[in-house]
Amino acid sequence: MQSFRKPLAGVDHPQMDADVVIVGGGPAGLACALRLSQLIDEHNARNPDSQLSKENISVLEKAREAGQHCLSGALLDPRSMRELLPGFEKEAPLDAEVEKEAVYFLTEKGKWKLPITPPPLRDHGNYVISINRFTKWLAKKVEDAGITIFNGFAGSELLLDGENVVGVRTDDKGVDKNNQPKSNFEPGYDVRSRITILAEGARGSLTKQLIDRFDLQAKRNPQTYGVGVKELWEVPEGRVAKGEVIYTLGWPLTRAEYGGSWIYGIDGRQISLGLVLGLDYKDPRTDPQHALQSFKKHPFTTKLLEGGKMVRYGAKSLPYGGWFAIPPLAGDGWMIIGDSAGFLNSQRLKGIHLAIKSGMLAAEAAYRALLARKFDAAQLNDYPKAVENSWIKKELWPVRNFHQGFEKGLLHGLFHAGLQQLTGGRGLYKKYPSHPDYEQMERIEKLSDEDASRAAIIGPARREGALTFDKITDVYYSGTKHEEDQPSHLIIHDTNICNERCVQEYGNPCQNFCPANVYEMVENSESPGAKQIHLNPSNCVHCKTCDIMDPYQIITWVPPEGGGGPNYDGM
Amino acid sequence: MSARGVILVITEQREGKLNRVSYETITAAQKIGAETGWGVEAVAMGAEVSVAAGEIAAKKLEKVYQIQSPTLQQYTADGYVAALKPFLTEKLPSLVLFPHTYQVRDFAPKLALALDRPLISDAVGYKYESGKLIFTRQMFQGKFAADVSFTGEPPYFATVQAGSFRADQIENGSTPAPIETVNAVIESSSIRVRPHEMYKEAKQAVDLTQAEIIVSVGRGIKEQKNIEMAAKLAEVLGGELAASRPICDAGWLPIERQIGSSGQTVSPKLYLALGISGAIQHLVGMKGSRSIIAVNKDPEAPIFDIADVAVVGNLLEIVPALIEEVKKAKAEA
Amino acid sequence: MKILVCIKQVPQKDAPLKLNESGSWIREDVSYEVNEPDAYALEEALRQKEKNGGEVVVVTAGPARAQQVLREALAKGADRAIHLEGDEFVKLDAASTAKAIAAAVKSENFDLIFTGLQSDDYGYAQTGVLLAEVLGWPHSTIILHIAKEGDGLKLKRELESGYFQDMEMPLPAVLTIQSGGNKLRYATLMGIKQAKNKPMTKLGWADVAAAVGKNGLTIERLYIPEKQKRTETIDGPPAEVARKLVDKMRNEMRIL
């Protein structure tokens, strides 16, 4: 019998006081920490008599090491980094400046090149980076600045005092499969903080708690998501030039899916290759990992990869909803930044620069709050106001309706996108509505013959030589690892729905949308012929697609024991 | 140093009986000797080791030394080093080889350093290239092999991993090798450790890494009750039972018996994979096995890529037949 | 008791390692962790301190990045750390490493030095024993239980094939600790915070170079182990397959 992770009852939690706790050590959280440190340093230099301390500012990061859970293509628009650390190019680990770019439309065997690269996909001046290395570098900056990063600690619950967020409880460590404490049990800490900043990445688990608790999404579009799957390859020299960027549309996706693929040249030998897929697809059999494998089988891609070797694999979700899906960004004692808030330009497929900028703006608000010794919503609303007045809004406003336009497929999307281009982002409607992704999924019985064209992206992928891999092999290359003896951190609130209803209605799409083989339907040993859900939580790569996509919304992703998860070294 | 090089094998005996890896080490020495032209000699040591020395003398060796002292009745690192240091100082062999056992790990590095000479531990092979002796050993838990050489003057020291050479390839001598007794003089005050008698104890934990034979089951075993059949096969073979992840996940076997990236890494002499498809997570934990037999009904199963012997078939039929056949073979032996 | 624990930083277990053309492994872009057997040595030392009082000091030799394993040990409860810092330490063989550590700690009066069983990277399983020889101390290896008795220790060590042995030993001594005996503790938030203020002594290559001397071993090259396996397929009815397998077990694998 599977036990699910839950807070242990009757446990005393040690306390730690903090001024600011940032949950999540990705680009947003680290930029926030670094900016706050800069402001405090400047303040202290100006005011020798009223010094601010950094001792009680900390970052919680669930990965064993900085950057290990960070995944992106990645292209960095340097705008915000230049503001945070002028001249950062000289010391940051940047692989290449983008020098060449092209967009192709693929059919199953053929390709045609777009005569011009559409402006949103023009990347001259951006950098190809490994977000993993970049984050490690940023983390070192933060630690050198005197701010503590607690690696291997996840935020498992928000601490509330009435309507105020007053901190975070970290994960319990040393809990066995059956939710019993082991001999090395360590209860989670209650980090009681004046300001809690959520920087957990897309679909953050504390952010989700906060949004639910205060119904923050009520007046907003629901957040919608995409999932990105990526492989890092080493290929013979000269296949893709250093700094070369290739985007493809079309095959293996059909007109009903929103997404595309990328290939980036890192250093002449290493290439980053991946596929993003909007989670508003309708066919429950759709499997993003399979789609990536098919993309590699296109003659265009195969030629680039031949004789090469896959070295890493990863997957993550990304928020596509745009400006209208961003929840209120601050309240009593809390702020939300980065992907957790939905700062991503879905037209340019770029979010790192926005994540960094949002972190910086939140840091500035936190700094003013520390000076004013006020931490309520009125004070912290400085941050959303600053966002309104910043280039974040200028960048996101014209594309506010971009992704919603694609809800009905590629052709509709292109129509709306063209119209929006002409009307400064407005298009046909002032505010294009959107729907939660899982609502778009159709029941198996509703699939028509037309859906047969989807063979390249549905069901499990097969292993073929050194080119394509089944899912479990890819998972191995994510380097994911968890303490084995712990309860499942994928909480299914009612497994009967999986075994009885979903199997009929949707064919258990968790097996397909999960890019890490966490969900499996296995023979039921008690009733032959019947299948039952089986979980492999240790395979999880923390992409949270299951939490987003399950059609009955009965899966909740919570952080496993801190330190567990993928190892995206070099990704 | 003697005019002609000599390889000296320090064997390990308990109650007059040599362990298998000591014989394997003699094989290694004979092979190296054949290539280098060095003579091969061996040492048995203890309080009274004439039986073991006689046993070794039947092998093709130029000489056998029995190093004896009442102080060597019980093994101690201090005692062994006190006995061997003056002996080696006088003999100055080119190469001193040991079996890589827990006991050797305990004293060989100390002995080598006492003579200010380097030791290559846990060698699995050797190369003799243009007058240079190189030992190969595994590093990074088998991810890489390494060629390691000595610097400076001999004698050189190396320990040989169990199973790297074959005891049955040992060459016997046409006449018994001469046995020379060396009475070691050891100050009993130089022994700083006071060991008690050894005792056997049921281990609290299974240690699959030490098992020579492992019968491992995967999802193809179908039902929990079939585990018993695999356990029986492990028992008749004198091996340990292990499993791939789904079996331990289901609670059919404890997690200590899980092989693979989230379990144990093993390299037994025989790994018998029953109904294991061979996901890479499993393969990384067992691909270093000396021999791999895989039984699976799916001819495309990746386990067959690394198996020495592939059986495409129904394990529920093959395992019972195999149990009977092994029993028969054991009865004959 | 005053206990020194030797800790090594090694690549994380599943880290994909790469070789360069000259046959050495590429140390950049790899995630590191504490050598797991050393984590058990530290655990035992912390438990000894809880029982008998005293001090636990951790030492490592390696480049700046290796400081991470000392920080973790301090966060788990070690009192202070010694870092032999420099790229020179990376290239040392086991004997040279032992000499360097001995030179660094000889002026401190440790009662005990613990090491792990072996390292998960090179796996020489020698450094602890060599350290004892350099210091002129007694040692014992693969230790399961340690009890202080009078001026010395009572130990239980593991031998092969299910045998164990008890022994007595005087102090000071070097012990290599068997892995898996204790459950490893977790670092706590407070522990990590406090670790920042614990003393960390740094020594450079120049401080110990005179005592180290030349390496006795040279790693000529690393390579992916060659595989010469050919898969042989056996078929037929079960009884026949069983006969053929037993024949192979007896005559080729020689395990019967």
Image (cartoon, coloured by chain):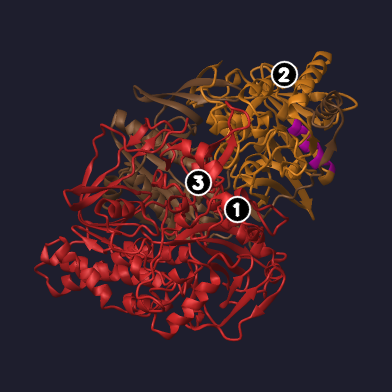
Chain colours: A red, B orange, C brown
In terms of image quadrants, where is residue B267? top right
> How far, Cα to Cα, is label 1 from label 3?
14 Å
Residue closest to the eye, A486 or A437: A437
* Residue B27 among magenta residues: yes
Q: Is mark 1 on a helix, strand or loop?
A: helix
Residue A397 percent coordinates (x, y): 35, 77
User: SS for tag 3?
Assistant: loop
* Residue occupied by mark 3: A481
The residue indicated by pointer 2 is B236
Looking at the image, residue A550 sits to the left or right of residue A286; the answer is left
Q: Is residue C147 toward the left or the right of residue B300 in the image? A: left
Q: What's the magenta bit mostly, secondary-structure-wise?
A: helix
The correct choice, above or below, for A194 with respect to B325 in the image is below
Please state which of residues C208 and A374 is positioned toward the viewer in this rendering.
Answer: A374
Q: Distance between the residues labelled 3 and 2?
A: 35 Å
* Mark 3 vs 2: CB contact within 8 A: no
Mark in front: 3 vs 2:
3
How many neighbours does mark 2 have within 10 angstroms: few (below 14), some (14-19), or many (20 or more)? some
Q: What residue type is labelled 2?
A: Val
Mark 1 belongs to which subunit? A
Q: Earlier in the sequence, mark 1 or mark 3?
A: 1
Structural distance between the alpha carbons of marks 2 and 1: 38 Å
User: What residue is rendered at 57% in x and 39% in y?
Assistant: A521
Residue A211 can be seen, yes or no: yes
